[in-house]
Amino acid sequence: MVRILFSAPPGLWAEYRAPLTRALDEAGIKAEIVTGTGDPAAIDYVVFAPGGGLSDFTPFTGAKAVLSLWAGVETVVGNPTLTQPLCRMVDAGLEEGMVEWVTGHVLRHHLGFDRDICATEPHWDQRVPPLARDRTVAVLGLGALGRACAEALAALRFRVLGWSRNPRAVPGIDCHHGAEGLRPVLEQAGIVVLLLPRTPETEGLIDAERLSWLPEGAVLLNPGRGALIDEAAVLAALDAGRLGHATLDVFRTEPLPPDHPFWRHPRVTVTPHVASETRPASAARVIAENVRRAEAGEPLLFRVDRARGY
């Protein structure tokens, strides 16, 4: 029997108890799941999300892996006490939710829905939007979520440019990489989607200089990480008319403070970090599969590369 510690913010255990128990049973894993550490050395696996009170992994000398419930691991990957293998969350629920949010907001801006929905006076504006094939969308970040979104947008016939820090190949997507590949991508993008992880290299990536590379009136969508953008630079670009709109789901401080200028700016849409949530049913199956793999001596899924930070 394996012993699993579930360490997450209060309230999550009630959501995960049944699906995680069921997923472990379906995987053929006999497990005891606890929410208190008791004897840390007796714990075989830690299911982890920030906010559960666990910050020192040193006592978990018998733990074979720490299994994150979050796709992003920037809050824990640099923890010097975490020497166990760390796996991030990649599951179908996260991917589907992100694809729906991204395609929905890309289409909203592409078709100009805001112009019609926000009208307060009778109007008959018959401006016809271009076809998707005539609109270029740049997806920055071609991991599991970025790739899925790029492929969905390409299926809608948008011209999709992909950018990543390291070389990637995605069929049907014009892929670029490295510092030298970013400018030509941004210079062509009518809509930019940020789906990069937060690392020292991506912190503040979208700054004043890179915003100046965009075509005038371009739209920025950020469902990735709040730290990817320089907030002051985005506001300045919006005020100058350089940036047409920013639809933002993630922020450096969450919840977004009530006095933050994003709330009041007429060309900013705030969504409350809902672009892609971990769904307990699908996430539990990922956790159970990694436990099964570790017990069988097989490679873990989605193991984090500590040097790269994800």
Image: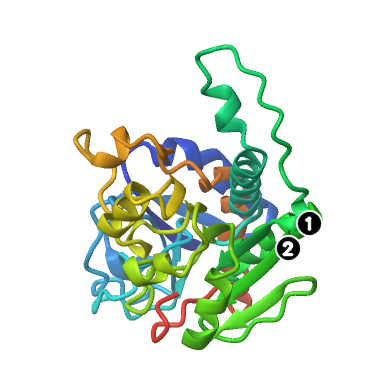
Amino acid under disc 2:
Arg
**Residue matched to label 1:** 133
Q: Residue furthest top?
A: 122
Q: Quadrant of residue 59?
A: bottom left
Location of residue 70 (image quadrant): bottom left
Which amino acid is tagged 1?
A: Arg
**Residue 33, percent from left and from top:** 44, 51
Closer to the camera in the image, 134 or 41: 134
Residue 53 visible somewhere in the drawing: yes
Q: Do callouts 1 and 2 mark residues in contact (Cβ within 8 Å)? A: yes
Instruction: Look at the picture and state if 258 lies above or below 27.
Output: above
Q: Which residue is mark 2?
A: 159
Q: Position of residue 144 (x, y in %)?
A: 62, 66
Q: Regarding mark 1 in the picture, which secondary structure is present there?
A: helix
Residue beneath the point at 29% across and 50% down = 52
- In whole angstroms, how far apart are the C-alphas of marks 1 and 2? 6 Å
